[in-house]
Image (spheres, rainbow, N blue to C red):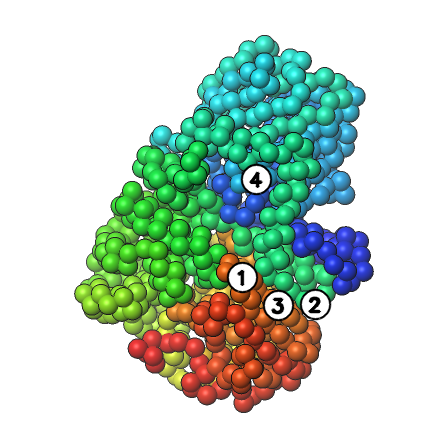
Amino acid sequence: MRNLIQSISCLLLALTFGVAGAQQPLVNYVNTLQGTNSNWGLSYGNVYPTIALPFPVHSWSPQTGKNGDGWKYTYDAKTIRGFQQVHQCSPWMGDYGVFSLMPVSGSLKVKEEARQAAFSHDNEIAKPSYYKVKFDNGVTTEISPTERAAHMRFDFPKDESFIIFDGYTKFCEVEIIPKKRMLVGYVTNGIFIPKEFKNHFIIQFDQPFVKFGTWSAAGDSLFVDRSFQKGEKCGAFIQFKKGARVQAKIASSYISPEQALRNLQTELGGYKTFEATRDAANAVWNGLLSRVKVEGGSEGDKATFYSCLFRANLFSHKFYDIKANGDPYYFSPYDGKIYDGYMYTDNGFWDTFRAQFPLSNLLHPTMQGRYMQSLLDAQRQAGFFPTWSNPGMSGVMIGNHAISLLTDAWMKGIRTFDPEKVLKAYLHEATNKGPWGGSNGREGHQYWFSLGYIPYKEVSESGAKSLEYAYDDWCAYQLAKVTGHKFYEQIFKRQIYNYKNVFDTTVGFVRGRDKEGNWVPEDFDPVEWGDPFTEGNPWQWSWSVFHDIHGLMKLMGGKDRFNAKLDSLFTAPNTVKFGSYKQEIHEMREMVLQGLGQYAHGNEPVQHAAYLYNYSGQPWKSQRQLRTIMKKIYNAGPSGFPGDEDQGETSSWYVLSALGLYAVCPGTDQYVIGSPAFQKITITFENGKQFEIRAKNNSDSNVYVRSVKLNGSVYHKNWISYHDIVKGGVLELEMDSQPNKKRGTSADAAPFSVSLHD
């Protein structure tokens, strides 16, 4: 089935783009259906066809799943039951602040199962700035977005014409104002929301109402001519003249109804037509996508690249509004109060510290500066740094990776925050446990500072947490060291090598260890998933020492044994033992389907592993393996991702890797060199400077880097600094079908490892 869907997608792309090489607006390359062929048991992205501007407050999506289902839109669905305002960053987390509109033709139907309408992908256009679908019943829906609003247009056949407003699964208050052709109100739904949370909405229609009414109890009770309704699972309906063309301008705010109206006027007031809104959204996306211009490669390669670049620029969501005087302010998702300034949310840092934030540090340093300060603001309001906000604190996943974001930003010259305040807050983070899940504060912190590792069975996922705490403490140490804070430097220096305490040299893998120091379980098997590891096994987790690959290499017995082990990661039988999960989880199945040994690219812990030959004197193996991964498990179709897309992480991995760059160790200023996927790439930065990556003779067979020059001078290192990139220049790589086994092999060519460079 996957191959059939990919073949159809490639055919559609060819029909869309026409002759290879023809110039297209870059937004045309984006397919927002990429990754939508997903379900609970198997993820090819677990995303919905997002209609949004970059890093929006609100996104929009057609809804094929029932209300409350995290799988909002699945590619194999045959019907749509609504068009939602969405904020969901993962189906596993659920959504919040949701409401929807649905056009209904013929008789009035408000229940979601009754109102759903059949459609075909042949009658669907799915772009970031424009979505259109014509239902089998003849009704057409179109949507174009702004940051805090959307413009919708509904075309009805010559029959009774209704629009249904659905307040979703929890509390809703809705008022119909016929004289003003408006719906106003608010919804309160979501898991990780403060009690004060409300999403205030205003919907302005351009056509008069023929009839109207409300409904409650998920549609079991219908009230004709009633203009006000509140309660759980309630909504409203509006009838228009037969065969109407109806436009709706929709805006909302977490702050107040007045701010929702201001958002409507500010963001949509200047667009007299739907086409004007669509053209403005197109211009925003074309402007952003053109900042990373790729040349060479197939049209399909470009579609994959720009579809991934689109996904990489959606999360985190802005969570602030703009006052009448132009200043930002926000409702805090942490304490429910109103503050001046910027706030961002809907992101799980366990996923995104690895690639999404290092990519944004290149493309969006101004936003990143605001974001870093907002992390300190969130910490002040909640008592701890966020780890996965949705929109408030959840504590999902493991580690304390806000410190990675902050240190990485600082090392790359983004210095909008006080590092002493960060270090003080992080010390609190590392020595306390908060109330919101395993990553809120530090679970097992007493063991960490007394034993030097998290003991097996005393704390769940102990091995994984030991590895991630060591990296996070190195980030704090790094920030303290470069900013001259000796007190914090000495505190965190003691833990940066603690990863060694969970590496068993007798078996050559990381593993669990009890509080007496014994390796457990005794019947160790590196293909067994789960406790003491998170969504993976020792094969994948043994490489998670981002800050000290050289030290890891020594534990494995030196370069030769390290390289042999790394070779085996990609060639070992892709056997799975369920371990503590007791059943197959989707990450296991995805690893098997990818056919890359024990390398499980669908989940984050191992995504950097293909770059590690750059540390061990065999960079050509990284070059070959990276191009294999990009070509084999990514495409622009509905099965286009190798697992959960995870708030731009998996797409950012592809974007950076296609550029030939990757930040193996966020918290340094280094991007490790891989193998670019295109012959020429031009990155335009916020300040207008440009960095060109030229890959001469690049092709599907010429994946090896024969030589490198930086601004005309021979360059022997396997990494390049952030500052050399953003000041502009040219990185020239000569590509070949045969590896150059002499370039990049010396010790001084290797990227940063703390045990070598400290």
User: Of label 3 and label 1, which has the lower sequence position?
Assistant: 3
Q: What whole-number distance in Å separates the C-alpha atoms at marks 3 and 1? A: 15 Å
Residue 665 spot, x, y in % from top left: 41, 68
Amino acid at circle 2: Gly
Q: What whole-number distance in Å separates the C-alpha atoms at marks 1 and 2? A: 25 Å
Label 4 element class: loop
Instruction: Identify the residue shown where x is 37% and y is 82%.
Output: 554
Q: Which mark is residue 681?
A: 3
Amino acid at circle 3: Ile
Q: What whole-number distance in Å separates the C-alpha atoms at marks 2 and 4? A: 32 Å
Amino acid at circle 4: Thr
**Eye-nearest disc, 1 or 4:** 1
Task: Please rate how many residues cluster around mark 4, counting C-alpha atoms within 10 Å: few if below 14, some from 14 to 19, many from 20.
Answer: many
Between residues 598 and 339, which one lies in front from this camera angle? 339
Instruction: Identify the residue shown where x is 61% and y is 56%.
Output: 289
Q: Is residue 403 above or below residue 574?
A: above
Task: Please rate how many residues cluster around mark 2, counting C-alpha atoms within 10 Å: few if below 14, some from 14 to 19, many from 20.
Answer: some
Can residue 647 be seen at all in this image of the molecule? yes
Residue 310 spot, x, y in % from top left: 59, 53
Between residues 646 and 730, which one lies in front from this camera angle? 730
Instruction: Identify the residue shown where x is 65% and y is 65%.
Output: 294
Q: Is residue 123 above or below residue 545?
A: above
User: Of label 1 and label 4, which has the lower sequence position?
Assistant: 4
Q: Which mark is residue 688?
A: 1
Q: Is residue 625 above or below residue 417?
A: below
Q: Can you identify the residue that label 2 sits on?
A: 297
User: Of label 1 and label 2, which has the lower sequence position?
Assistant: 2
Q: Which mark is residue 146?
A: 4
User: Of label 4 and label 3, which has the lower sequence position?
Assistant: 4
Label 3 element class: strand
